[in-house]
Every structure is written in structure tokens, then in C-alpha cells.
């Protein structure tokens, strides 16, 4: 671990002395200021990464120190640095935590878990496979964030009924949701972005299900990994004593059947709105309506609703959004990209370029929005493909898929953040499970993509 930390800091120092080619159209003074802010952003990222890995201070404290550092160093304004606190995903998280808690308080989640266990048995592998399959299928056409939020209380109920650590099902749930998003055009924003870049360049765009030619093999390979090697890497810790844990005994009390029906109806209503009416009612609004109904109908008290929100998750995600924004605005992400491209050279073989673009895209997306990451790298990939005379479809597909491989940190993608608190995970747990999954994804991609879209 110490070697990894030293390597990370050395990379930051190397980046700080890299070229300023990205600022050619700016004045010298503006370029120098942006370069300084980009380097400062990378240093803040490096320090945050070290603190996340070592957990010397709580994760939420580190995350909220990031926007403070960005503001004090003048990298971005305070409003932009703290913009994560009013991001719609944060609202979505809070709302779904409350809706999920209602299922526990009324005993519905436990009943669902008992039913699933009766059908599938108590086999950890069979139950984990079932949860992953449902998550992947839903995420192919729905938001992977919404999918994870909806399945979270059900997955915890299954784990409780089966009598094993909830982390063993929550980590696969989040990662499978991320994998499933790669199957269709609308499954994840990077897919839409690479299509847009192709269309702008006057090239053939990918079809709606064309992403499935790589997305389905990736999802299947990822599930096999998570059911074998990955399952052994997921920590088997006691379930955290949070509000969900306290609620697991709810079925032992005399609970109104009416409240059970109401809480179930609220969840189904939220799912239907998210699935079919998200263009009219945004996801975060749907989750908020569901949370309000839980309190108004009495399925949860106001205090229970407050306690059900995992504040570590909220502050971790909100705090790191400011850094993601700063990486895009200051050009820190482009600084890294230019450095990598400069090292490998634009005249390298297509396979070397694809490998470099995969790990660059996957690496940036661990801390940077996968949308911003793809928007940054897709035009670069297109230019390199044209220069090499290689297939732009192969290289852009590689970039888009890699941007969705944000498996190695809890802040890389919302599903990872959602399961952090309920699963009792540490930052390093994501590294242990996620890094091998990224490598598996690379191996599948480097084999399948050139076959489907010849170089």
C-alpha cells in the first residue's frame, strides 16, 4: 500500500511538470493560472486518495475537506466547490434511503427476503446471481443509480433472511448495475456521448443494441468473476448497526397490514415513475415524493425518516462532486490525458492505443464523472484513430466502456456510493474487488471489440 501511495504522489509531481499544450489558445497569464489550478487539483486528489485508502480520518470528513481545499486554494469558487450538496443524485439517495427504511419498518423487506430464500435456497452464490441478474437487466434500460436504490432494501432483506453478511450481496448488486448499463445505448451516459462524437464527425453511429455485443460478454464475465474470485475478496464483516439493522426485527412486532401494503405501493409507484415517466418526473423528484408519502401515511415517523439516511454516503458523494467538476474545469483531466498520450506516442499500434485509452479512461472515471471523462477523451480518441487510419468505432467503444468501469472506488459511480454505508465497506474494499474486475473488463474488451469492430 505504501508503494502505491508513493507512486501516486510521484505521478502528481510528473504531471505538474508536464507541458501546457492544452492552453495554446490562451494568453500566457491565463495558461499559467489554469496550469497552476490543474496541478493544485491533482495534488488535492492525491492527498484525498491517500486519506481515503488509509482512513486516518473518516471518509465523510475527507470528502467534505475537498471542497474546502478547492475554495481556499482558489481553484473554483465556493458555490461550485460545494455544488454537490444540492446535486440531484444526493436528493435521490436521501429519498430512497427513506423509502427503503419504510419497507424494513413494516417488515416487507424481510418477507420478500424470506420468499426469495424459500425459492432459491440459502445458497450464497445462487442468491447473489439472482440479485446481479435483476440489477444488470434493469440497468440496461433504466438508471443504474435508480436500479441500485430500488433493489437496496430488498437485497438487504435477502441477506438477512439467508443469514449471511449483507456486503456479500450489496457489492455484487452495485457492480452488476454498473455492468448492465453498458448493454444498450441509453444504459449509461458514455454510450450516448461516443455516439454523439461519431455523429458529429459524420460517421456511422452505433445502434441501440449494438453496445450489447460487448456489454453482454462484459456483464457475463463480470458476474462469473463476482461469483468466484470476487466473492472471496468481498469482506465478510458483521452487518453495521444502522437503522436498517434496527428495523430487521420489525416483523416481530404487531404491524398493520395496511402499512405493509402502503409501503409496498409507494415503492412500486416510485419504480414505475422511474421506469416510464422519468422524462416528466425526474428520478430525484420521484424519490422525494415517495419519501414524503412514507411519512405522511405514517409508515415511518419523521425521526425514523431522518435516521434512515446514511449521512456518510451523502457527504462522501457530495464532497467529491466538487473535485470532479474542478478536474474538468481546470483541465486537470486533460493534463493527465496529454501526459499519457505523450508517453505512448500517437504512432503506436492500435492495440497499444486501445490499451492506453482504456486504462486512462477507467482511471479518470474512478474520481471523475464518467460523462466528463468520455467528453474529454472521445475527441482525442477520434483524432488518434484518424491519424493511425484505425477504426474510430473500436477506439471510441473502448473509451466509452472503460469510462463505465468505475468499480475501484466508492465515489466512482453512484451505485458504489449507495452501498457503502449499508454494506459496512471501507474504501480499500472497493480497490480489492474493483481493480481485478477492471482487469477482467479490459481482457474481454481487448478481445471482443477488435473482433466486432475490426481495427
Image (tube, grey):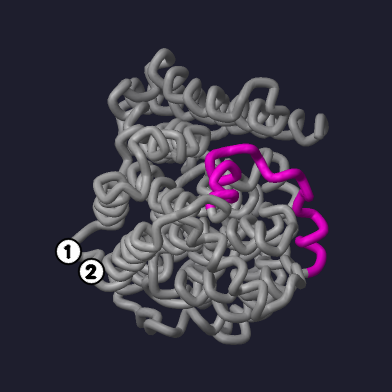
Q: Nearer the viewer, residue 22 or 397?
A: 397
- Which residue matches tag 1? 280
Q: Tell me the distance, in whole angstroms, between the alpha carbons under discs 2 and 1.
A: 5 Å
Residue at the (27%, 73%) spot, across then down? 276
Q: Residue at x 66, y 76 (%)?
A: 118
Residue located farthest toward the top when viewing the structure as drawn? 72
Q: Nearer the viewer, residue 127 or 431?
A: 127
Coordinates of residue 180 in the picture (x, y in percent): 52, 71
- Residue position marked by numbered label 2 in the rendering: 277
Does 169 sit left or right of 72 as displayed? right
349 or 270: nearer the viewer: 270
Q: Quadrant of the N terminus?
A: top right
Q: Are marks 2 and 1 in contact (CB under 8 Å)?
A: yes
Quarter holding residue 138: bottom left
Residue 380 drawn in magenta: no
Q: Residue at x 43, y 77 (%)?
A: 184
Label 1's element? loop
Residue 98 is labelled as none
Q: Quadrant of the C terminus?
A: bottom right
Closest to the observer: 247 or 444?
A: 247
The segment highlighted magenta reads 228-250
Examine the rendered structure and indicate whether residue 183 appears above or below residue 249. below
Q: Picture coordinates of residue 81 (x, y %)?
A: 36, 27
Q: Is residue 159 left or right of residue 247?
A: right
Amino acid at each position: 500500500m505504501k508503494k502505491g501511495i508513493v507512486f501516486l504522489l510521484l505521478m502528481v509531481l510528473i504531471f505538474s511538470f508536464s507541458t501546457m499544450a492544452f492552453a495554446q489558445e490562451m494568453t500566457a497569464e491565463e495558461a499559467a493560472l489554469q496550469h497552476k489550478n490543474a496541478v493544485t487539483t491533482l495534488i488535492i486528489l492525491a492527498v484525498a486518495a491517500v486519506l481515503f485508502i488509509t482512513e486516518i480520518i473518516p471518509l465523510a470528513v475527507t470528502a467534505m475537506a475537498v471542497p474546502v481545499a478547492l475554495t481556499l486554494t482558489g481553484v473554483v469558487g465556493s458555490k461550485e466547490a460545494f455544488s454537490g450538496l444540492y446535486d440531484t443524485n444526493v436528493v435521490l439517495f436521501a429519498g430512497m434511503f427513506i423509502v427503503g427504511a419504510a419497507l424494513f419498518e413494516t417488515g416487507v423487506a424481510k418477507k420478500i427476503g424470506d420468499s426469495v430464500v424459500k425459492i432459491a435456497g440459502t445458497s450464497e452464490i445462487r442468491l447473489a446471481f439472482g440479485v446481479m441478474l435483476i440489477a444488470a437487466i434493469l440497468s440496461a434500460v433504466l438508471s443504474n443509480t435508480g436500479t441500485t436504490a430500488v433493489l437496496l432494501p430488498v437485497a438487504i432483506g435477502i441477506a438477512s433472511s439467508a443469514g449471511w453478511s449483507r456486503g456479500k450481496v450489496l457489492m455484487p448488486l452495485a457492480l452488476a448495475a454498473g455492468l448492465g448499463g453498458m448493454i444498450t445505448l441509453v444504459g449509461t451516459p458514455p454510450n450516448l456521448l461516443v455516439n454523439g462524437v461519431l455523429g458529429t464527425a459524420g460517421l456511422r453511429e452505433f445502434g441501440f443494441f449494438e453496445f450489447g455485443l460487448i456489454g453482454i460478454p462484459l456483464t457475463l464475465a463480470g458476474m462469473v468473476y463476482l461469483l468466484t474470485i470476487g466473492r472471496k475478496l468481498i469482506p465478510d464483516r458483521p452487518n453495521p448497526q444502522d437503522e436498517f439493522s434496527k428495523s430487521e426485527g420489525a416483523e416481530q412486532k404487531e404491524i398493520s397490514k395496511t402499512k405493509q401494503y402502503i409501503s409496498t405501493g409507494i415503492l412500486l409507484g416510485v419504480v414505475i415513475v422511474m421506469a416510464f415517466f422519468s422524462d416528466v418526473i425526474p428520478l430525484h423528484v420521484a424519490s422525494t415524493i415517495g419519501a414524503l408519502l412514507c411519512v405522511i401515511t405514517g409508515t415511518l415517523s419523521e425521526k425514523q425518516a431522518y435516521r434512515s439516511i446514511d449521512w456518510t454516503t451523502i457527504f462522501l458523494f457530495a464532497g467529491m462532486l466538487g473535485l470532479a467538476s474542478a478536474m474538468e474545469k481546470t483541465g486537470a483531466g486533460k493534463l493527465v490525458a496529454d501526459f499519457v498520450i505523450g508517453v505512448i506516442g500517437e504512432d503506436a499500434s492500435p492495440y497499444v492505443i486501445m490499451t492506453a485509452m482504456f486504462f486512462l479512461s477507467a482511471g479518470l472515471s474512478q474520481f471523475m464523472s464518467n460523462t466528463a471523462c468520455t467528453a474529454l477523451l472521445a475527441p482525442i480518441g477520434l483524432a488518434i484513430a484518424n491519424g493511425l487510419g484505425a477504426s474510430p468505432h473500436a477506439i471510441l467503444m473502448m473509451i466509452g466502456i472503460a469510462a463505465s468501469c468505475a468499480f475501484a472506488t466508492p465515489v466512482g459511480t453512484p451505485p458504489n456510493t449507495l452501498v457503502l454505508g449499508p454494506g459496512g465497506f471501507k474504501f480499500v474494499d472497493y480497490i480489492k474487488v474493483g481493480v481485478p474486475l477492471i482487469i477482467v473488463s479490459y481482457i474481454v474488451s481487448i478481445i471482443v471489440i477488435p473482433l466486432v469492430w475490426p481495427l
